[in-house]
Amino acid sequence: MRQSEGTMDSNKEQADRAPGTTSIAPGVLVTLAKHTALRVPGVVAMAPLPGGVNRIFRPGSSEGVRIEVQDGSVRIDLHLILAQDTNVRDVSRKVQAEVTRAIEEMVGMDVVQVNVHIEDIRYAESQDS
């Protein structure tokens, strides 16, 4: 009985919606992934993508982020610079979890992979210098 109630609710939601589709530009996913990663404590900046100028003109790429969408699923590569004295493993796992959550909750797309590439560690300048 409960299953049929869920089906009725789903049918009602579909009936209340206007017909049409929603498309998400790759740049939206890039922005969401980038800002989510930068909010994780220990992440200080995005690193440039390897490959130089060719990456600038590639769809789904931006400084530090590469997005690939295939069959409605998202694969993400993040290139990060971390703060000194940061546990790299913990920060990487937190970035993976937060970026996955943000994209799945806000966009509704399935995230199948988040690869975190630590490109550098940034040390604070000594105040004695």
Image: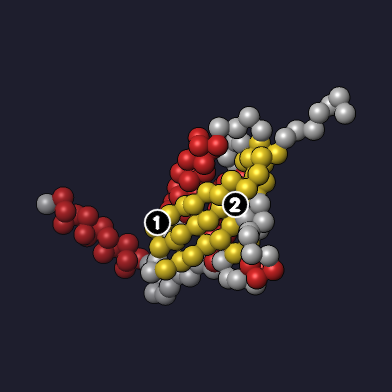
Single out the mark in the foreground, 1 or 2: 2
Where residue 83 sits: x, y (%)?
Answer: 66, 36
Asked whether the viewer can see residue 106, the reply is no
Q: Residue at x 65, y 44 (%)?
A: 120
Instruction: Locate residue 122: give its quadrant.
Output: top right
Where residue 112 sits: x, y (%)?
Answer: 39, 56
What is the three-letter code of the residue carrying label 1?
A: Val
For label 2, the SS is strand
Label 2, on which residue?
Answer: 79
Q: Residues within 10 Å of mark 1 (few under 14, many from 20)?
A: few
Label 1, on which residue?
Answer: 112
Q: Residue at x 65, y 71 (%)?
A: 54
Residue 30 in the image: above or below residue 102: below
Residue 87 in the image: above or below residue 59: above
Q: How many marks?
A: 2
Q: Is residue 91 left or right of residue 44?
A: left
Where residue 40 sits: x, y (%)?
Answer: 57, 39
**Which residue is nearer to you in this view: 118 or 4?**
118
Asked whether the viewer can see residue 87, the reply is yes
Q: Residue at x 48, y 70 (%)?
A: 23
Q: Are marks 1 and 2 in contact (CB under 8 Å)?
A: no
Disc number at residue 39? none
What is the three-letter code of the residue carrying label 2?
A: His
Q: Is residue 90 left or right of residue 58?
A: left
Residue 127 in the image: above or below residue 35: above
Q: Quadrant of the C terminus?
A: top right
For label 1, the SS is strand
Q: Residue at x 63, y 67 (%)?
A: 55
